[in-house]
């Protein structure tokens, strides 16, 4: 039975790959999802709620009590940000639109929790062009180093492309590059996404970098364990191979759009 449930969830995740992330959120449909509903769209709603911190359990594809409470919490949070919603736990078009907005409010973080943030400038000091990931991927060479410039500070450092199918997995070239990386990330590794420009073959390409090294490590003696994820326009996440709305928005920010 457990294996059957896992296979069903895997199938649902695979179905996600065939449909663009915003197709159901921006279609203008009047469909309202509520307790008892099920299917692919419910799974997507749960994935997004979990990403934003409102749902603490793995998505099931079935709209039950925990999803209802998570949606209520999101609706309350939107109200505190100046967008009042009916707090009914149902996912109507208005709540759906806000949930999949790149600026959707995350769950409230207690003041006691320290959140490192790198420096933010009122206007970008570096900008790049939008190039689709399918094109960028063909331009990158495994093992080659590329200059990355932070759009807010102009700080530059080098990252080595170590692979990646849905987006670029990159590592610091050497320990000499770590100081600039740490500065733009707020001196602490975190999950915040920074607008950056990656110079590839002489072209400055807009990208989004997450300041949290993890996973495989191919470059020795660079002062960092693991790799960071760098998204370009059209890059997909590890979760169900769907678009990451925050990364996509940050890429467009790096292109000054």
Image (cartoon, rainbow, N blue to C red):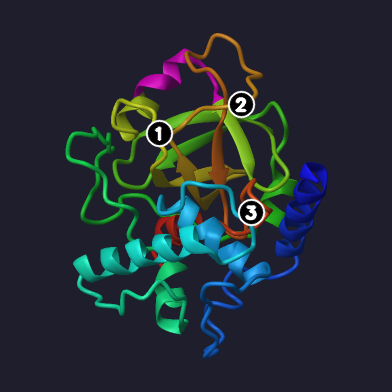
Residue 145 or residue 80, whichever sits in front: 80
Q: Are the two marked residues, 3 and 1, in contact with CB atoms closer than 8 angstroms?
A: no
Disc 1 secondary structure class: strand
Q: Is residue 99 left or right of residue 154?
A: right
Q: Which of the 4 quarters of the picture holds residue 161? A: top right
- Lower position in the chain sequence, tag 3 or tag 2: 2
Mark 3 or mark 1: name the one nearer the start of the chain.
1
Q: Nearer the viewer, mark 3 or mark 1?
A: 3
Q: Is residue 137 magenta?
A: no
Task: Give the side of residue 209 with respect to residue 61, left or right.
Answer: left
Q: Residue at x 34, y 35 (%)?
A: 155
Q: Are marks 1 and 2 in contact (CB under 8 Å)?
A: no
Which residue position is annotated with label 1?
Answer: 156
Q: Which residue is mark 2?
A: 215
Residue wearing tag 3: 236
- The residue segment tinted magenta is 172-179
Between 245 and 8, the residue placed more toward the observer is 8
Packing grade of label 1 (10 A; few <14, some 14-19, many >=20) is: some
Q: Give the structural element (helix, strand or loop) at label 2.
A: loop
């Amino acid at each position: 039975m457990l294996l059957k449930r896992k296979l069903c969830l895997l199938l649902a995740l695979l179905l996600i790959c065939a449909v663009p992330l915003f197709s159901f959120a921006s279609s203008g449909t009047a469909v309202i999802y509520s307790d008892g509903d099920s299917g692919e769209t419910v799974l997507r709603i749960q994935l997004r709620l979990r990403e934003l911190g409102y749902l603490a359990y793995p998505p099931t594809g079935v709209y039950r009590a925990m999803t209802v409470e998570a949606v209520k919490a999101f609706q309350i949070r939107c109200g505190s940000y100046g967008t009042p919603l009916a707090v009914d736990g149902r996912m109507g078009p208005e709540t759906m639109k806000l949930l999949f907005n790149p600026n959707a409010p995350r769950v409230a973080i207690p003041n006691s929790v320290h959140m490192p943030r790198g420096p933010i400038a009122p206007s970008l000091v570096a900008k790049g062009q939008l190039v689709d990931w399918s094109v960028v991927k063909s331009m990158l060479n495994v093992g080659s180093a590329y200059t990355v410039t932070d759009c807010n500070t102009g700080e530059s450092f080098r990252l080595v492309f170590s692979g990646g199918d849905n987006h670029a997995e990159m590592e610091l070239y050497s320990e000499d590059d770590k100081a600039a990386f740490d500065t733009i990330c707020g001196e602490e590794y975190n999950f915040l996404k920074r607008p950056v420009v990656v110079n590839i073959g002489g072209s400055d390409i807009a990208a989004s970098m997450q300041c949290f090294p993890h996973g495989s490590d191919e470059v020795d003696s660079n002062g960092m364990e693991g790799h960071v994820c760098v998204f370009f326009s059209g890059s997909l996440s590890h979760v169900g191979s769907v678009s990451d709305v925050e990364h996509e928005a940050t890429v467009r920010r790096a292109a000054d759009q």
